[in-house]
Image (spheres, helix red, strand yellow):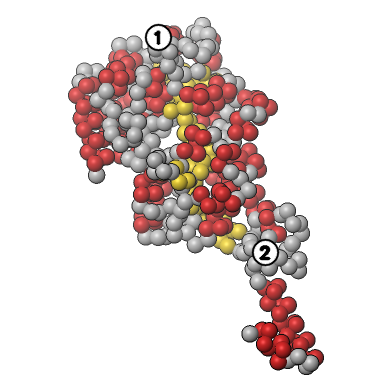
Amino acid sequence: MKTRKRKWLAGITLCMMVMSLLLSACSSSNPDSNSGSNSNSNSSSSPSANPKDEKATIRFSTWYGAGDIEIWKEVIKRFNVDYPNITVKFEPLDFSAYWQKLPTQLASKSAPDVIGMHVGIVYGYVEKDQLEPMDSYLSTGEHKIDELPEALAAEGQWPKDSPKQYSLPWRFTGGALFVNRTAMEEANVAYPENGWTIDEFVAAAKKMTKPGRYGFLIPGFSMNAGLMGAFGTEPTTADKLHSNYNSPEVLAYKTWLHDLIYKDKVAPNPKDVDSKLDPFVSGKVAMMLSGAWNLPVYRKIENFQWDVAPMPTKDGKSKTYAGPDMMAMTKDGKHKEAAWKFIQFAVFNPKAQELLRTTGLPMLKTDLANDQLVGEIAAQKPEHIKTFLDGAAQDGIGYAFTKKFFEIGGFENDADVKILQNANADIKKELDKLHEQVNKEFEK
């Protein structure tokens, strides 16, 4: 059409000049144009220099722990240096509120473009077709999935027999055995070596127990992962579809925990623990299983020296609670390209990871292999951070990482009240009930 028009106007100089100007204007406004006339183009290597980076506002929501809100705000600032055309509206919520609100938002197609995603339960959202697969973005993007440890990337893949990537980790985290080094020295307890046994662990707890302080705190739900793993088991079967609570190994583990309270007397009855105080920070317990996300809080401790220690072993087995916190794109998000740029920045960009790993563990393969980086973290405490890293990377284990994660957690917590708060509890009976509850939940 344009060719015929040009032929028709051939020879008419004024009209040709007008046509030339019109065509030039159209070319400059075309988002697919590579014209250098874009006034925002300062460098061909800058992401913001690409005319395809149209202005967009994306919403990002996730839960938060100590320090997370401030860290994410700084990540967003750094992201905007590279992508000034993308505005990120940050909508943080506390853990409980987040997981109550998100399902409603997804069902009503009003969820944010980018959402925090919990390991395990991501599978349920995938089955409801509420998350956007990332495979095409990864295949054409500047970063590849093999920059991440395979075990972390796999937690965002579903179904397991023909997996697609629906979420990516932004933080490698887990649970470590935190120890009061001052209490250990006072009790003449040596810092434990790798491979120390369950019996040696109990002996150390006994030595550090005194009026006003217990040697250990009974862990809650997922913090059980490492110790239960040492007993050779976990809450669900390998296919993540059935309960394992009636196994002899779980019975042995829960009985051992019960003995720590009523027989060895090295741990308080859970009902006597003040939920408003961190028992480790307050010095009420000398050893406690706690999450890496609490590192910023523990680094403020001034009353005693602290560290992390190797997980105790049983029958030669040692496990460490480990897994990723992840982020995903919603299926109904309005700005998927912009959302992907933000996710890619948070997961792979060193400017983001140097912030995000401060409440977890280094996550990228290059960071895990960086001795200088590990040394810098150790200088901030804990001194033996490599013990944590090695345990999580080599013997990491999840805890009920299934789409029924929250439901299983509620059932087990209820069972633990009956088991651990009662000196004469029928532990096997309570575990059998728990086993039946969990299997019924899986059947829904």
Q: Quadrant of the N terminus?
A: bottom right
Other residues around mark 2 within 10 Å, as few (<14) / some (14–19) / many (≥20):
many
Look at label 2 and name its amino acid: Pro
Q: Check the image and report above or below for 227 versus 316.
A: below
Which residue does the numbered mark 2 point to in the structure image?
51
- Mark 1, secondary structure of its residue: helix
- Whole-percent x and y of residue 251? 27, 20
Q: Of the residues tagged 1 and 2, which is closer to the observer?
A: 2
Q: Earlier in the sequence, mark 1 or mark 2?
A: 2
Nearer the observer, 140 or 234: 140
- Whole-percent x and y of residue 272? 33, 24
Nearer the observer, 335 or 307: 335
Quadrant of residue 211 in the image? top left
Other residues around mark 1 within 10 Å, as few (<14) / some (14–19) / many (≥20):
few
Quadrant of residue 28 in the image? bottom right
How many marks overall? Answer: 2
- Whole-percent x and y of residue 365? 60, 33
Look at label 1 and name its amino acid: Asp
Res. 238 in view = yes
Q: Residue at x 45, y 46 (%)?
A: 164
- Whole-percent x and y of residue 94? 44, 45
Q: Check the image and report above or below for 366 versus 115.
A: above
Res. 342 in view = no
Which residue does the numbered mark 1 point to in the structure image?
199
- Mark 2, secondary structure of its residue: loop
